[in-house]
Amino acid sequence: MTFRSRILAGFGGVVLVPLVLFGLRVRVVMANRLTAEYERRVAAQADVIRADIARDGAVIARRLEALSEAIPADDRFRSAVLAGGDRPYVLDYAGTAMRSAGLAMLVIQDSVGRVVSSGHFRNAYDRPEPALPRALAAAEGGLALVEARTPEAPLLAIARVDSLRIAGRRYTVVGGLAIDSARLVALTPDPELGVTVALPTDTLTAGGADTAAAAVREVSLPFIQEGDSLGATRQARILVRHSLASLAALRHDVDVTFLEAVLAASAIALVLAGWLSLRISRPLSALARQTAAIDWDRLDVAFESERPDEIGRLTRLLGSMIERLRAGARRLREAERRLAMGDLARQVNHDVKNGLTPIRNVVRHLAQVAAGEPERLATVFRERERTLDSSIAYLEGLAGTYARLYPASVAGVCDTAEVIRESVWRLDRRGAELRTELVEPLPRSATDPLVLRRILENLVGNALDALDGGPGTITVAAAPGPSTNGRATVRITVSDTGKGMTRAELDRAFEGFYSTKPGGTGLGLAIVRRLVLDANGALRVETEPGAGSRFIVELPGVTG
Amino acid sequence: MTPFQRHTLLVALVAVACRGTGPGRAGAPPPGALPAPALPAAGAAPTDTVCRVAGGPVQKRDTVTIALAEPVDPAHAPLARNDAERFVFAQLYETLLRVDCAGRVLPGLAASWIGTADRWTFTLREDARFWDGAPVTARDVVAAWRLRDSAFAQSVAIEGDRVLSLRPPTVPVQPLADPALAVTKRAPGGGWPIGTGGHWVSETTGGIVWAVPLRPGAGPALRVVTALGGRLRDAVDAAVDLVLTDDPAVLAYAATRPGYLDLPLGWSTSYALLAPGRGERTVAVGAEGLRDAVHLDARPADGSDGGSVWVRELGPCEPPGDRELVASPGARPRVVYDQADRNAADLAARIVALGALGTRAVAAGLAPGAFAGAVRVGADAAYVFPIRRRVFDVCRATLELPPWSADGSVAPLLDVRSHAVARRGFPALELDWGGTPRVLVR
C-alpha cells in the first residue's frame, strides 16, 4: 500500500466511522421515540373509538325508542299492518323513517321475524329473518356489528334492537348506523392512523395506516350476519394501527442527510488527504527519482530545498552527501590518472628494455670479439646483424604502437612457430633453462606477429620473475588446439617451475598495477590478458604455490 | 263483426305473424309458410269508446299544455325512444294505416284499400299533404319506407300518383301502422322531419314544443313541456291541461288538486327477466309479490290480450348480432339493471330478496350505456329489461332484444302503465295498438 493510499484510508476512517456511528445512533433513538409516540396515539384513538361506539349505541337507542313510540301512533301504518291494504305505504315506511331518523339501517319485523318493512332493503319484505333481533337482544350491551343484506352489496352497521306493540302484536325494530370506509375515516381524522374492521367474513379498512403498522390496538364487538339462520354471534375486531410512513419518511430523511454528510465529508477528506499526501509524497517521489539517477558517472544531481521540515533536511543531507561523493570521485580520478601515467612510463621502460637488451648483448659480444678476435668481427657482425635488425624493428614497432597511444588490434596472420622461436631466441634467460616444445605443423595464428611476440615476452618474463633468479625451467610449448565452430585454434603454453601463486594472488594476477615483485609494474599479465582478448583468444592459468604456474593461451588459427 | 270479434281476429293474426319468416317477410312466402292474412275491409272510424280515454265533455280551447316526464329529441323523429316521444310523434306523423288498441284497422294516409290474394292496393287520402303544402304521393310513401326498411319497400309497386300496391306479407297488417314506417321527408336544414299529420312543429325553444294545427280551427295548438324529476307536480300546480306520468307520487298529488282526473292508459310496457345460457339457466320468479316491489301502476304480466307474448315466440325472427358473443355467467350471480330505471332496480332487488338466483346473488345497476353493452354480451346471470308490451312488427321489435335472447329464457314479470292526469274538458285521447295516446282534435 502506498503512502498516499494510507493517508487516504486514514482520513476516511477518521471521518466516516464516527459519522456512521452517529447516524445509526440517531436512527435508533428516533425510531424508539416515535414508536412510543405512535403507541400512545393508537391507545388514545382506541379509547376514542370505544367512546364513539358507546355514543353511537346511545344515539341508536334513543332514535329507536322514538320510532317505537311513533310507529304505533301512525294510524295509516296501524291500519295497514292490522287490516291489510296500503301496502306501498308499509313497504316504504321503514325507508322514510330510516332517513328521517338519520339511520342507515332499519328493519321492522313482526313477532315471527318476518320483515314487514325494511329501510335499507325495501324489497326484502316478507322475508323471514327471526334470528337477527334475537341475536341482537342477546348481544353484550345490546349492541353489535351487523352485516345486513342489500341488493347491491352487504351493509355493515352498528345496530341494536327495540320493540313495540300494535294492538297487542309485538314488532321488533332493528336500527343502526353504517360502518363504512367514510365512517372509519371520520373516526380517524389523523391521516397516519388507520382503522380496520376485521370481520369473520371480510375486512374493511380505512385511514392511512399501512399493513406494516408499528402499533396496533383492537376493540372487540359482537358480530351478526343477517341471513344467518342460526343467528350465531361471533366477534369482530376494530383494529387501530399507526402508519409507519412518517417513521419511514423520517428515516429516509435521516438517511439522505446522513448520506449527504458522508458524501460531503468524504469529498472534503479526500481533497484534504490528497492535498496532504501530495504535499508529502511528491517531494519524496522527486527525491527517489533524483536518487535513482545517481551513478558514478552522474554525480551532477542537485539536491536543493528551502523547506524547513524533515523532507527539506533530508534533501539537504542528500545534497551534501552527493557533494562529498563528487569530491571523492575527483580525487579518485586524479589518482587513477597519475597511476595510469606511472604505469605507462613503467611499461614503456619495460618494453624499451626488452628491445635494448638484445642490442646491448650484441654490442657487448662485438666488443669482446673486437678485443679478442678482431679478424672475426666482420663474421660475428654478420651473424648477429639479424638480431640487431630484429631488435631495431621491435623498437620501431613499439614506437609506432605507443605513438598511437592505444593501438587497435591489427588483424593479421603470423607463422606461430616462427614467432615463438624468434621470441624465445631473443629472450634473456637469466640463468634459467628455456625450452620450446612445438608440435609441427602448427596452424598459423590469426594474430598480428607483434601482438604474439609481446604476449610471449610478457609471459616468459613473468615466468623468469617467478624463478627469483634461481635455477629452474621455463617451457614454451605450442600445439594445435581444439576446433571451435570448425575453426582451428593454437594452444600456447608457458610453464615454469617457479614459486607458483596462492589463491589470493591468482585472483588479482590479472589486475592492473598488482605485483608481488619488488619494483614490478603489475601490468604484464594485464597487458597479456587484454592482448589475448583483443585477438579473440582465451587465457587461463593453472598454478599451485611451490609447484610453479602454467599459462595457457588459445588463439584462433588459420587453416591452410 | 263486433269489435270484440275483430279484436280476437287480429290477436290471432299477430300470433300467426310471429311464426313468419322474419326479415324476409315482404318477399314471397317460403315453402310451407302459412298463407298471407286477409286485408280487413276499409270502413268508417269506430264510434265506440273502446280505445278512448276521456275526462268528460270537451271544452273548446285554442291551446292545450301537455307536461311530459321525459325529454323529446327532434333528431329521433319519427322513431320514438321513450313514451314522451311516442306521444309527440303520434301527433305529428301518419302511417299508411292505423291500428287502435283493439286491433281495428283504421284509415291513415290511405283512405281506402282493396285486398286480393295476390295484391293489396292502397289509395292515399285525396287531401293528404305534407306540412309544406306538397301533396303526398305514392312515390313519397315508398321513398320514406325505403329509408327505414328497404326490403319492405321493394315489395311495393306504384300504381298511380296516389295508388300503390304491395304483395301481401306473411304478417298481419300491423306493420303498416308501425310508426317506424311513418311517412316523412327530410326538412331543409335539418330539424323536425316534415310529416303529414294534422299538427306541425312551429317552434321548439327551451324544451317546449309548439305543435299547431295545419288548418286554422282544426283543433287546439299543443304546447308540450318537459318537466323532469319532481317538476311534474309543479306542472300540476301550474294548471297544465295534461300530464303523462307513471309516478304514483304525482298521481297522488294530482288527486288532491281540484279539476284533475286520473285516467289510466293502456298497459304499454312489460318488465322481463332475461337470462342467457342457451336454456341452461331458467330463472323462475313467481309473479306474486312482485307488484309491491315497484312504485308505479303495475300488474303481474299474464300475457292477456296477447301482450308480451311476442317475446316468448321469437322463432321466425332472427335476432341481430353474433350469438357467439354469449359469454359464461360470472362466478357471482348478478341481476343487472339500468340504474336510470327505478322500476328495474326495484325488481332486481326483489329478485335478490326472493333468492331466485341463490343467496349469493346481488343486484348491479349499470349506467345506460354500460347496461346496453352488458346485455348485448350476456355475461351475467339475468337482466331486468323493459320491453314494449305490444308491438306493431314483432321482427322489428326483436332487433331491440339482445342477440342471445332466442336461446335464453325470457320471463315477463310485470306489466306497467302510465296515467294521464287531465284537466276536466281536455280533449279525449285515443290509444293505438302499442298503447300510445293521441289527442283527438276533432
Image (cartoon, coloured by chain):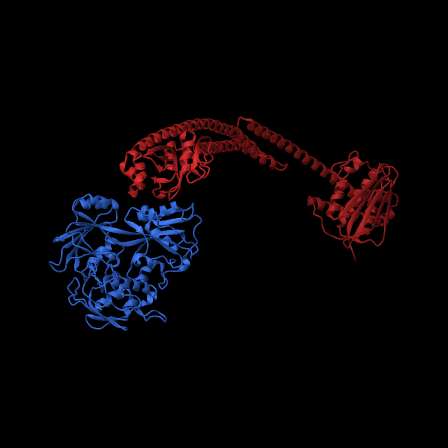
Q: In the depicted view, which residue is nearer to us: B198 or B389?
A: B389
Q: Could you tell me residue B378's position as x and y percent?
A: 39, 54
User: Relative to A463, is A38 on the left or the right?
Assistant: left
Q: Is residue B6 visible?
A: yes
The image shows residue A450, relative to residue B23, as above or below, that is above
Q: Could you tell me residue A208's position as x and y percent?
A: 41, 35
Q: Colour of chain A?
A: red
Q: Could you tell me residue B269's position as x and y percent?
A: 29, 54
Q: Could you tell me residue A335's position as x and y percent?
A: 68, 33
The image shows residue B266, relative to residue B21, as above or below, that is above
User: Relative to A525, is A279 on the left or the right?
Assistant: left
User: Relative to A102, is A293 on the left or the right?
Assistant: right
The image shows residue A463, relative to residue A40, as above or below, that is below
User: Relative to A345, is A28 on the left or the right?
Assistant: left
Q: Which chain is blue?
A: B
- Screen quadrant of the C terminus of chain A: bottom right
